[in-house]
Image (cartoon, coloured by chain):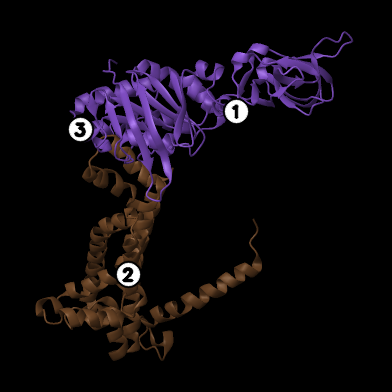
Amino acid sequence: MRTNPYLAALCLLVGVFMLGPVLLSVSAGFMQNYALGWRGGFTLQWLLEVWRGYGSTVLASIGIASAAVICTILIGLPCAYALARSKRTWALWFEELITLPVAVPGLATALALILVYGEFRGFRQHAAFILAGHVIFTMPFMVRVLTAAFRRPELRTMEEAASTLGASFKQRFLGVLIPAVLPAVLSGALMVFTLSIGEFNLTWMLHTPLTRTLPVGLADSYASMRIEIGSAYTFVFLIVVLPLLWLMQLSERMLAKRYAH
Amino acid sequence: MPTKQTAISIQNCSKTYPDGTIGLRSTQLEISPGEILALLGPSGCGKTTLLRMIAGLEIPNPGTRIYFGPDEVTNLPPEKRQIGMVFQHYALFPHMDLAANITYGLRIRGISHAAIQARLAELLELVRLSGLEHKRPGEISGGQRQRVALARAIAIRPRVLLLDEPLTALDAKLKESLRDELAELLRRLNITAIHVTHDQQEAMAIADRLAVMNQGEVVQFGTAEELYRSPANPFVASFLGHMNTVRLIKNPNGRRGILLGGAWLDIATDAGSGREVLIRPEDIDLYAVDGDLTERGLGRVVHRAFLGDRIQLRVITPEGIELKVQRARDCPLRVDDPVQIEVNPTALKTFGGE
C-alpha cells in the first residue's frame, strides 16, 4: 500500500512537535552555556554533576518502581481473581472504588496518607512510605488488566478443566491460572513501572530530603540549578527509563506470541 | 487397557438457576458400566447442564442423587470425582506443551516420573500424536487439539468420561472423520462415557444409547434404531432425521387417513390416535407419470437439490401438501415434472393431541 503523503506529513509534524522539545532539552545538557548554544562548546561536566548530586535518586526510583510492581502483582492477583469470579454487587462497587486514586488528585491521596501515617516516624521517613503511595496509585491499573484476563471465558473453562483433572484450588491457581494470565501480568507490570517511575504529584508530597525519586530530583534541579543541569538530568532520566521500558515491552510481546492460539 | 467399568445412576436430578430459570427438570438415568450414552438435543435443552452436574461443575437442586457405581458423588467437588472431561473448545493449557497438558492430572497426583513417562508414551501412541509432545497447543491443528484433550482426560484412567460437544469446534469434513475415529477409540477404551451433542449423526455414530432431551427433560431414551423407528413423540421424530407432517382427516365412511394427490391412504388403527401423520422422506417413492396411471397419488416436483450421495426433492400435491422426498442420486425427475407418489403404509405413525 502506498503511503498517503498528507498522512506522512501529519505524522512528521506530530513527531517533531513531540520530540523537538525533548531533543532540544537533552542537547542543552551537553552545552557549556545554553545562552551561547553549541558555539559555547560541548561538555560532560553537567552530566557528572547530576550524577554526583542526584545519582541516588536513579536507584531509589528504580527500586521503588520495581517494588511497586512486585506489590501490585502480589496483591492484584488474588484481588483480581476474586473480583472476576464474584457475582455480587459489592464486587462491582469495589472495582469502581479502587479506581478512585487515578481520578483523585495525587496531592489529596498523599495528604490522606500523611494524615493517617504521619505519626509513624519510621514509616513516614522511609522510602516505603512513597512505595505505599505508588502502590495505591498504580493498583487499579494492575487490577483492571488482571480482572479482564481472569474474566475471559476460556480461562474459566481452563480452571474447570484443571478441576476435573483433580487439581485443588491452590494447584489450579498457581499451576494453571497464574501462568495463563502471565501476559496480562507483564503488561500490567509495564504500566505500573512506567507510572511509578514518572510519578511526581504524590511523590512530591510524600518525599523527605533523604527519600527522593527521579522526578522529585528533576523538579528540584529545575527549580534551583542551572538550566544545563536540569537538561542533563532529563538525559539521565531517558537513558535509565527507555531501555527498561523497551526490555519489558519486548518480553511482553514475546510472551504474547508464545501464548497465541 | 483394562479399566474397571463404572455404572452411573442419576436420580431425581434437577437444576433451577438463581433467576428462576429451569435448567433441568427432574431426570432419572441409569447408564450401564462401559456404556456410551449420548445426550442429544437442541441448544438450551439442558444437556450440557446435566453433564456439568455429573462432572460436579454445576450444583444441582437439593434432592438430586448421582452415583458412580456404589459411591454417591452428589456433593463431591469435580477434583474428587475421578472423571475425565473433554470440553467444547478443549480448554488446553496454552502455556504447557502437549506432554505437560496430557500428564497434568498425573503430575497433580504425584505419580512417579517413570510411571508418567510410560503412560505418556502409551497415550501419545493411542491418539497418534507421538513426536508432537513438545509442541504447544497453539502450534497444532484443531483435530490434533481435540485428541490432546481426549488423551489428557483419559490419562488418569477416570471412572467416567464426559464429552461436551467434542467435535463442534471442527469443520465439517474433519468432523466426520474424527467422529468415526472417536467412536472407535471410545469402544477400545471400554469406559463409561457420556457424550453431549446437538448433532444426531454424531450421536448415532458414537453412542450405544441416546437420551433425547428437549426443554429441560429427557423425552426419550433408547438405541438410535429404536428412536428412529419408533419415536415417542413428534419432537424425537423430527429431531432424528427429517420428517414430513401431514394432517389426518376422516373420509365420508368415517375412516381416518390422509389424502395424498387424490389417493386415499388408510391409517391403521394401531398407528396411534393423534391428529398428524409423520412420514420419513425415505419412506416415499416417486414414479414418473408414463401413461398407465395407477391408484397412486399425483404431485409435481417443485424443488430438486443434488446432495452428492442422494437427491432431495420437494413435491407438492393438488391438496397443497408439501413433501420432502429423498431418492438415489440417479433419480431422473426434474423440477415441474409430474410424479406418482407412493407411501409405504407401514411406515406411517400418528402424533398430536388426542
Q: Nearer the viewer, mark 2 or mark 1?
A: 1
Q: Is residue B162 above or below residue B260?
A: below
Question: What amino acid type should be assigned to the residue bearing mark 2?
Answer: Leu
Q: Position of residue A78 (x, y in %)?
A: 26, 56
Q: Is residue A153 left or right of residue A67?
A: right
Residue nearest the viewer, comparing B156 with B274: B274
- What is the number of callouts on the image? 3
Check the picture and name the quadrant holding the C terminus of chain A.
top left
Chain B image colour: purple
For label 1, count other residues whose C-alpha is less than 10 Å away and answer few (under 14), some (14-19) or many (20+). few
Q: Is residue B37 left or right of residue B202?
A: left
SS class of the residue under badge 2? helix
Chain A image colour: brown
Q: Nearer the viewer, mark 3 or mark 2?
A: 2
Question: What amino acid type should be assigned to the residue bearing mark 3?
Answer: Arg
Q: On the same chain: label 1 and label 3? A: yes
SS class of the residue under badge 3? loop
Which mark is on residue B352? 1
Q: CA distance from mark 1 to mark 3?
A: 54 Å
Image quadrant where residue B96 sits: top left
What residue appears at the point 65 percent right and 70 percent down from the top-left corner? Answer: A6
- Residue of label 3: B109
Q: CA distance from mark 3 to mark 2?
A: 41 Å
Q: Position of residue B94 (x, y in %)?
A: 37, 41
- Residue of label 2: A97
The residue marked by circle 3 belongs to what chain? B
Q: Position of residue A126 (x, y in %)?
A: 14, 76
Check the picture and name the quadrant holding the N terminus of chain A.
bottom right
For label 3, count other residues whose C-alpha is less than 10 Å away and answer few (under 14), some (14-19) or many (20+). few
Question: What amino acid type should be assigned to the residue bearing mark 1?
Answer: Gly
The residue marked by circle 2 belongs to what chain? A
